[in-house]
Image (cartoon, rainbow, N blue to C red):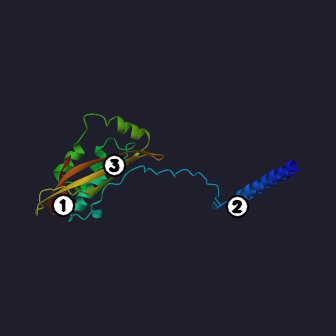
Amino acid sequence: MVYTHRRITVALAAALTTTTLLIAGCSSSEPNVSPQTTEARPAKVIPYSLPTLELSDVDTSNPDEVALAFAETAYTLLPSVDRNQNEGMVRASVVLTDQLSAGVRAFDPPTGPGYDWNQWAKNRAIVNASAEVGTQEVPPQTATNAYRMLQVTQTIESAAKFIARKSFVLLVSMLSTPGGWRVDRITQL
């Protein structure tokens, strides 16, 4: 009889455990989660050309705006279209002094654009530049001269992926002209 009583107790315990497990499995405390779809990131649209900076798009009475417009235009590049890095400078030449503009237009790099440039061109990458006026001390602005330190960041990416990010500092010297402020000298620090 003890043997039968033990058998019944074991059977009841097993039945109770099974019932508990079934109830726990059916009433999950997790929210109802629908299957997630894996969507590919939309491809970045790479333009076939970059616009030339228009003087009408820049407040030439403001040296900050002139410096920023210059840097963002001059350092945004399309390696698959531009022959070399100087093409951005040419696109920004409208905010350069006549002498600097002539020098930029006549400049012919003595060597090719380099390995990175060729790889970016092969991948149809774009080099997007953004610039901010830095907090570094510069000579005081006068009625004829202004200086700005700019932090320039270039983000290089193709239609399919991020490639690299580079940052550098520029000292931009500007002269006041009858047509407004113009970039007269650029020094990469």
Disc 2 versus disc 1: nearer the observer: 2
Label 2 and label 3: CA atoms lie apart by: 53 Å
Disc 2 crowd rating (10 Å Cα; few below 14, some 14-19, many 20+) is few
Q: In the depicted view, which residue is nearer to us: 15 or 158?
A: 15
Disc 2 versus disc 3: nearer the observer: 2
**Which tag, 2 or 3, sits closer to the chain's start?**
2
Residue for badge 3: 154
Q: In the depicted view, which residue is nearer to us: 110 or 39?
A: 39
Residue for badge 2: 27
Residue at left offset 89%, top offset 50% = 1
Tell me where residue 101 appears, x and y as whole percent: 21, 50
Label 3 and label 1: CA atoms lie apart by: 25 Å
Q: Secondary structure at mark 2?
A: loop
Residue at left offset 22%, top offset 61% = 64
Task: Tell whether 143 sits left or right of 116.
Answer: left
Residue for badge 1: 181
Task: Tell whether 8 sits left or right of 30.
Answer: right
Disc 3 versus disc 1: nearer the observer: 3
Residue 97 seen from this side: no
Task: Tell whether 63 sits left or right of 13.
Answer: left
Query: Is 187 located above or below residue 25 in the figure?
Result: above
Query: Is 79 located above or below residue 27 in the figure?
Result: above
Query: Is 42 located above or below residue 84 in the figure?
Result: below
